[in-house]
Image: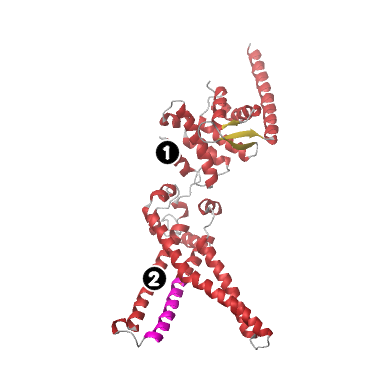
Amino acid sequence: MTKNEFLNYLENRLSVLNKKEREDIEQEYSQHIENKLSEGMTETEAVASLGDIDTFVDEILMAYNIDPNYRNTDEQNNILSPKRSVRQKLSSAFVSFFKMKNVIWLAKTSLYVIAAIALFAIGLDFAIEISEVIDENLPSFLCIDHIVSLFFLVSYILIYVTAAISIGYGVIRYNLPVSGIKSIFKRERGENMANEKNNTMGLIIKVLIFLIKLYIIFTIMIPYAFVLMVSLVAMGALVVALLAGYPVVGLSIGCFGFNIFSIAMFAIILKLIFIKKKGENEIETYYE
Amino acid sequence: MYLNPQFKKGILELVVLISVTGRDMYGYELVSEVSKVIDVNEGTIYPLLKRLTNEHYFETYLKESTEGPPRKYYHLTLSGKIYKDNLKAEWEQFYNKVEKFIKESESGDD
C-alpha cells in the first residue's frame, strides 16, 4: 500500500469524524511515514511498519467512543431495501420524512419553484407594460403576441428546469432515500470522498447550482432589495403624512407589515440559499 | 522483545505516559522511545495518544521543525500526571503481588 492509498483508506474509515480531527490524525500518520522515508524505507515498508490498519482505526474510533463496527450502509438506512417489511418501510419513510434535512429540502425546493414563478410574473408584468407602450409601433414579426408566447415558453422551461435541478440537488445534498437516483450518484458512505474529488457529474451539478444561485440573485434578490428600499422610503413618507393629519392609518400599517415580511423573506432566502451549512457531512452522522 | 499482547495493551499506556513526563515529545519521537521498551505496532500508539489527549491527560501544541512541516508536541497535563502516578502505583502493587505469588508457588513446588 502506498502512502496515498493508506491516507485515502484512513480518510474513508474515519469519515464519521469531523474534518478537523480527521486531518489531524492524517497529518500525524503522514508525518510518521515521512520520517520513515527519510530513514531510507520505501513507502510500502513505511506503511507496513505501522501494523494492521484496521486494528488501529478501530482503536482511533474507540478513542472517540464510536462503535468501530458501525457502518452507515445503504442496507440500514435505505427504506426501499427489500429485506424490510412493508410496514417497516412505511413507518421509517414516515419518520424520515420529518427529519430536519427533508424539511429543509422541501423548503428549498419550494423556494426555487417560487423563484421561477416570481420570475415569470415579473416578466409577464414587464411584457404587458411594454405592450401598452410599443404595440402600435412594432413591425408584425415582433408583435406582442409572439413576444408573450415566447416568454411563456421560456418561463415554463425555466420553471421545470429549476424544479428538476432543485429536486436533484436535494437528493444529492441531503441523501434522500430515493434508491434509484441514489445509486446513480453513488453517495454511499466510504465512496464519498473519492467521488467528490473527481466526479464530473458532481462538478456539473455544482456549476448548475451556482448558475441557479446567480439566476436567483438577478431575478429575486435584486428586485426584492429594490422593492424593500422603496417600501422603507414609502413607510417614512406615510408616517410623515400621518403626522400631518392625512387619513393613511391603514396604509401605514399595511406598509409596515409589508416591510417586516420583506425583511424576513429576504433573510430566509439569503440563509437558505447562500449560506453554506457548516460541516454538514460530519455532523449529520451524529444526528442520525 | 516479545511480549504477550494482553500484557502489552495494559502497560503501553503507562510507558507512553512515563516517556512524556521528562520532556515534551512529538509523535514519531515518542513512537521510537516506546519501541525501545515494548515491541509494538507503531500505528497503535497514535490512537492511544489521541485518546489520552481527548481525556485531557495530554495537551498538544505545534512547533516548527528544521525539516518538514511543524511537529505536534505532546505535553503531560497536571491531571495526566496524577493519572500517571496512580497507574504507576497500581502497576507496582500488582507487579509485587504477582511476583510474590510466583515465588510462593515456586517454593511450594520444591
Cα separation, mark 1 vs mark 2, equals 44 Å
Given the image, what chain letter belongs to the residue carrying mark 2? A
Residue A275 visible in the current orientation: yes
Tell me which numbered mark, 1 or 2, is placed earlier along the sequence: 1
**Would you say residue A125 sits in the magenta stretch?**
yes
The percent coordinates of residue B107 (x first, y second) are 66, 13
The percent coordinates of residue B30 (x first, y second) are 57, 29
Q: Quarter of the image containing the N terminus of chain A? A: top left
What is the secondary structure assignment of the residue under circle 1? Answer: helix
Q: Quadrant of residue A177?
A: bottom left
Relative to A264, A2 lies left or right? left
Q: Answer few, some or many: residues within 10 Å of disc 2's Cα (few below 14, many 20 plus, some between 14 and 19).
A: some
Q: Answer few, some or many: residues within 10 Å of disc 1's Cα (few below 14, many 20 plus, some between 14 and 19).
A: few
- State the residue at coordinates (48%, 69%): A111
**Would you say residue A70 sits in the magenta stretch?**
no
Instruction: Look at label 1 and name its amino acid.
Output: Asn
Q: Is residue A152 above or below residue A133?
A: above
Residue receiving disc 2: A158
Total marks in image: 2
Given the image, what chain letter belongs to the residue carrying mark 1? A
Residue receiving disc 1: A4
Residue A51 visible in the current orientation: no
By secondary structure, the bulk of the magenta-drawn segment is best described as helix
In this view, which residue lies farthest toward the top? B110
Give, as a single range, the part of the protein colored magenta. Answer: A114-134
In this view, which residue lies farthest toward the left? A141
Q: How is the image coloured?
A: secondary structure
